[in-house]
Image (spheres, helix red, strand yellow):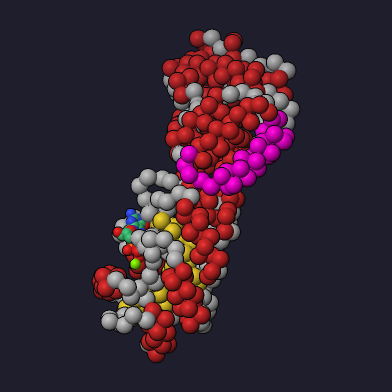
Amino acid sequence: LNEKFQNIFSQLKRKGKLNEKDIQEVSREIKLALLEADVNFKVVKQFTKNISERAVGQEVLNSLTPGQQFIKIVKDEMTTLLGGEIERMDFVDGRRNVFMLVGLQGAGKTTTAGKLANLLRKEKKFKPLLVACDVYRPAAIKQLEILGEELNIDVYSEHDVKDPVGIAKRGLQKAVAGQYDLVIMDTAGRLQIDETLMAELVNIKEAIEPTEILLTVDGMTGQESVNVANEFNRLLNISGVILTKLDGDTRGGAALSITYTIGKAIKYIGTGEKLTDIELFYPDRMASRILGMGDVLSFIDKAQNMMDEEKAKKLEEKLKNNIDFDLNDFLDQIKQIEDMGSISSLLEMMPGANKKALKNVDLSGADTKRTEAIILSMTNEERSKPGIINAGRRKRIALGSGTKVADVNRLLKGFEQSKKMMKQMTNSNISKKGRMKLP
Ligand code: GDP
Ligand code: MG
């Protein structure tokens, strides 16, 4: 999925202006990619509808960098789809937190119970108790006990008693007596949802009145996880989702479908087999991960925040009216870029950037200061008409800025190249309201 999006996005970046047809085409490709990744079709439909509606509006078409704007919309919409803001657990102060972990067999409930107890003991200073309500397989109780031993967390279990509701109740009593402030009930799963299991879970819920019912879902599963989630939610009114096995292969199909379909937030993700492999869920990070382009997107955000709108507009006017882009403008740009960190690291973030042409525009790190010094050593005339800077002037500028003639030469060469690029870009991209694209 990741790769598919990368392809779609690099195509987009290569385009100058986008028209409605382009957007439809790209939306269609995105749709296919998501469907192929086993994302629920209703979700896909709504998602692509949202992005094309936004894209066809002013936002993208009137922008100088329509491809990037569009990509940003895709990311924004995906973040929204994944729940928007992060939603943490409701920890009730002064009250015992009782969590019930539910889900299919193999989803990762038992492992997650341990991970979560361990994490919250560390973060919230809770005193956790694990309760083994999965009574059908002896191995299941043993598994939780071993986990508890490993983590040095107490486990309440009863062997030879096949009464999960009773165990849950007595586990809770132990928690009260022992002043445990976090109780995590590990419940039984099935390979499929069945009525007996569901009835049992409903009974446990009624008996212990948990503060959170967390549905544990195997993140490797696609659409079928939606049906499962729906059913658990219908019967138990879950409070949130924990998506496990999001390590290795990056698949987000389940995440996308679940949040949209059942409207419950994903709260944590499991990212590996180790007991510390659990993280809070961040919708925007997940979106970046699905789209495989976190860096590029943060670059766009950064660039948009840092670019001085006024200056960008002036420069744009200049370019549009074919007034020459001169060394003063170049200096302005360098200063803005400097604010954003080294240009080379930014360039690495941009798969679509013309790296070859930019090789000579070496503005990275310490070079920026030198470039600035050189330009500041030029007269105003030289800055606006770089053509007049002959050998004699170069020597003077080098002396004045404490650099070598070779540095001055390199800068002028870089400037010419960047000017050429700006011309190319504006010929294809210029518009009234857009923003300046970075060199
Ligand atoms: P349960 O049947 O729902 O209790 O599932 P378990 O907790 O027994 O987990 C089933 C398998 O999934 C075990 O082999 C776990 O090690 C594995 N597992 C659980 N969470 C993760 C995870 O986040 N990443 C990976 N790679 N494996 C996990
Ligand atoms: Mg289990």
Q: State the image coordinates of residue 273 (x, y, percent, origin top left).
A: 31, 57
Question: Where is residue 138 shown, x and y percent of the image?
Answer: 27, 73
User: 438 or 43: which is nearer to us?
Assistant: 43
Decide if residue 65 is on the left or right side of residue 345. right
Question: Is residue 58 on the magenta stretch?
Answer: yes
Please indicate, yes or no, whether residue 344 appears anywhere in the rendered image: yes
Question: In the depicted view, which residue is nearer to us: 414 or 216?
Answer: 216
Ligand 1 shows up in the quarter that is: bottom left
Q: Residue at x 27, y 81 (%)?
A: 159
**Toward which corner of the image does residue 76 lie, by quadrant?**
top right
Q: In which quadrant is the N terminus drawn?
A: top left
First to last magenta residue range: 36-62
Q: Position of residue 56 (x, y in %)?
A: 69, 34
Q: Is residue 207 above or below residue 361?
A: below
Q: How many marks?
A: 0
Quadrant including the C terminus: top right
Q: Quadrant of residue 84?
A: bottom right
At horizontal 53% and vertical 36% (from top left) the residue drawn is 32
| Residue 200 painted magenta | no
The single residue placed furthest to the bottom in the displayed view is 177
Report whether 186 appears left or right of 141: right
Please say if 182 is above or below 42: below
Compared with residue 89, is residue 376 higher up or lower down, i.e. above or below?
above
Residue drawn at x 53%, y 47% as measured from the top left: 40
Majority secondary structure of the magenta segment? helix
The answer to which of 237 and 382 lies nearer the viewer is 237
Q: Is residue 415 above or below residue 29?
A: above
